[in-house]
Image (spheres, rainbow, N blue to C red):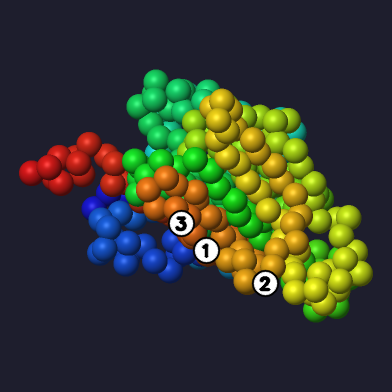
C-alpha cells in the first residue's frame, strides 16, 4: 500500500467533496488500488490554512462548520491563507489545486502550480486557468522535476474525455470536435425552456455547485472558450490562446427565442468546437446554436455535457457524461491521483514482468 500525502488548495465545493470521498473510501481504495490519501494541509482564502504532518481527520474537516479564519482553531492552523508556505513547506506528495478559475490570467492558480512543481510535488487540478493559459510551461516544469501535472477535470468534470481521447483515439485521425462543454449554461437553457427566468436558473445552478464563482463566465461562454483552448491544444496539437476563439454565450437568448425554437422543432445549445483546417491551422469558436431535435447533442439535458470527436477512421465518436458538480469533479481529481499512482516506475515494472 502506498499512502499519498496531499495538500488541498481551496476548500470550496470540489475539494470538500474530495475530502468527503477520502473520509468514506480510503479502505476500499487501499483494497482495490493499493493507495490511501492522507490530507496533510489545507488552505482557503476565507478559512485560513493548516499544516499537520501526521494528517488531518478528513471527516472532521468536512463536518466542522468553520467560520471565516476558522482553520486557526486546528492544531497547526492559522486564520491566514498562506498558500505559498503551505504549497512549498507542507510534507505533501500531491498538491490539489481547486481555487477559482481566473479566465484572464490564470492567477493565482498558475503560481500555486508552479510552487508545487518546483518543490517536487505532483499537481492535480480542476482549475481551467493554468491548463488553458500555461500548460506548456507547467508540463515542462513538471518534467524537469520528475513529477506529474494532471488536469482531467478541467474539461467535462468527472467524464474522462482528455485521457480517453489521447489514449484510446490515438491513430484514429482526430481532426476536430464539437460539444456541450458547460454544465451551467446547459442546465440554464433547460430551465428556461421550462419557463424559468435567466437569473433564477443561474441561482439554481449555483446552489447545485455547477456555476463558476462568477457565473458570467458560464453564461457568456468564457468557460467554454477555455475548454476549447485546452482540447484544441491537447488533442489537435494547437497553440491556441483564448483570443483565438470567437466567443458568444447564451445571455443574449430570450424566452421568446427559446419558445420559437421549441415550436419549430429546434433546441438552443451552447456549442464549443474546433477543427483542423486545410492549411493545418485550427478554427475554433463558442456560440449558441439551434439544433434540430434529432441532432445527437439536442437531447443532452441538465448539467450533462457531451462531445463528438471527429475522426478519419471512426467518423464521429460521441461521449456524454457529467459536466459539472462537486462530487463529479472531485472524482476527476481522484482519477488524476490514480493515474499518478499507476504511472509510478514500480507499477510499470510489475506490469512488464
Ligand atoms: N464545480 C464544478 O462543477 C467544477 C469546477 N471546476 C473548477 O474547479 C475549481 C473549484 O471549483 P469549486 O470548488 O466548485 O469552486 P468554489 O468556488 O466552491 O471553491 C473555490 C474555493 O477556493 C477558495 N479560493 C479562492 N481563491 C483562493 C486563493 N487565492 N487561495 C486559497 N483559496 C482560494 C475559495 O474561498 C473557495 O472556497 C474552479 O477552478 C472551477 O472552475 C471544474 C470543473 C467542474
Ligand atoms: N461552471 C462549469 C463547471 C465545470 O467546469 C460548468 O458549469 O460547466
Give the image location of residue 236, x and y in percent.
50, 36
Which mark identifies residue 320?
1
**Mark 2 to mark 3: distance in Å?**
19 Å
What residue appears at the point 32 percent right and 62 percent down from the top-left corner?
A: 29
- As helix, strand or loop, the secondary structure at mark 3 comes to strand
Q: Is residue 260 visible?
A: yes
Among the 4 quarters of the image, the one containing residue 122: top left
Is disc 1's CB within 8 Å of ligand 2?
no
* 273 shown above or below 145: below
Q: Which residue is mark 3?
A: 317
- As helix, strand or loop, the secondary structure at mark 2 comes to loop
What residue appears at the point 38 percent right and 31 percent down from the top-left corner?
A: 147
* 77 shown above or below 13: above
Give the image location of residue 4, x and y in percent.
36, 46
Q: Quadrant of the C terminus?
A: top left
**Mark 1 to mark 3: distance in Å?**
10 Å
Give the mark nearer the N terminus: 2 vs 3: 2
Among the 4 quarters of the image, the one containing residue 225: top right
**Mark 2 to mark 1: distance in Å?**
17 Å
Give the image location of residue 28, x and y in percent.
32, 67
Which mark identifies residue 293?
2
Residue 237 falls left or right of residue 2: right
Labels 1, 3: front one: 3
- As helix, strand or loop, the secondary structure at mark 1 comes to strand
Amino acid at each position: 500500500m502506498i499512502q499519498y500525502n496531499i495538500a488541498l488548495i481551496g476548500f470550496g465545493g470540489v475539494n470538500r467533496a474530495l475530502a468527503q470521498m477520502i473520509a468514506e473510501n480510503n479502505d476500499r481504495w487501499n483494497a482495490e488500488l493499493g493507495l490511501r490519501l492522507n490530507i496533510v494541509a489545507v488552505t482557503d482564502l476565507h478559512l485560513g490554512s493548516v499544516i499537520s504532518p501526521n494528517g488531518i481527520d478528513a471527516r472532521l474537516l468536512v463536518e466542522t462548520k468553520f467560520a471565516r479564519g476558522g482553520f486557526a482553531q486546528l492544531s497547526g492552523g492559522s486564520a491566514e491563507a498562506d498558500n505559498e508556505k503551505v504549497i512549498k513547506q507542507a510534507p505533501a506528495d500531491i498538491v490539489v489545486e481547486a481555487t477559482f478559475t481566473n479566465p484572464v490570467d490564470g492567477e493565482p492558480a498558475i503560481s500555486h502550480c508552479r510552487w508545487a512543481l518546483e518543490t517536487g510535488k505532483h499537481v492535480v487540478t480542476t482549475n481551467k486557468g493554468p491548463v488553458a493559459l500555461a500548460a506548456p510551461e507547467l508540463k515542462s516544469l513538471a518534467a524537469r522535476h520528475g513529477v506529474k501535472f494532471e488536469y482531467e477535470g478541467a474539461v467535462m468534470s468527472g467524464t474522462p474525455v482528455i485521457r480517453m481521447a489521447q489514449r484510446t483515439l490515438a491513430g484514429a485521425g482526430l481532426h476536430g470536435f464539437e460539444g456541450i462543454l458547460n454544465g451551467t449554461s446547459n442546465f440554464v437553457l433547460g430551465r428556461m425552456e421550462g419557463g424559468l427566468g435567466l437569473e433564477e436558473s443561474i441561482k439554481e445552478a449555483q446552489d447545485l455547485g455547477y456555476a463558476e464563482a462568477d457565473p458570467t463566465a458560464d453564461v457568456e461562454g468564457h468557460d467554454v472558450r477555455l475548454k476549447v483552448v485546452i482540447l484544441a491544444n491537447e488533442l489537435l496539437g494547437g497553440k491556441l490562446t483564448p483570443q483565438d476563439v470567437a466567443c458568444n454565450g447564451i445571455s443574449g437568448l430570450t424566452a421568446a427565442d427559446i419558445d420559437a425554437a421549441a415550436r419549430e422543432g429546434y433546441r438552443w445549445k451552447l456549442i464549443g468546437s474546433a477543427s483542423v483546417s486545410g492549411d493545418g491551422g485550427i478554427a475554433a469558436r463558442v456560440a449558441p446554436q439551434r439544433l434540430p431535435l434529432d441532432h445527437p447533442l439536442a437531447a443532452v439535458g441538465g448539467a450533462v455535457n457531451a462531445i463528438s470527436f471527429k475522426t478519419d477512421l471512426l467518423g464521429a465518436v460521441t461521449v456524454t457524461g457529467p459536466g459539472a458538480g462537486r462530487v463529479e469533479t472531485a472524482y476527476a481529481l481522484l482519477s488524476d491521483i490514480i493515474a499518478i499512482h499507476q504511472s509510478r516506475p514500480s507499477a510499470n515494472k510489475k506490469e512488464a514482468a
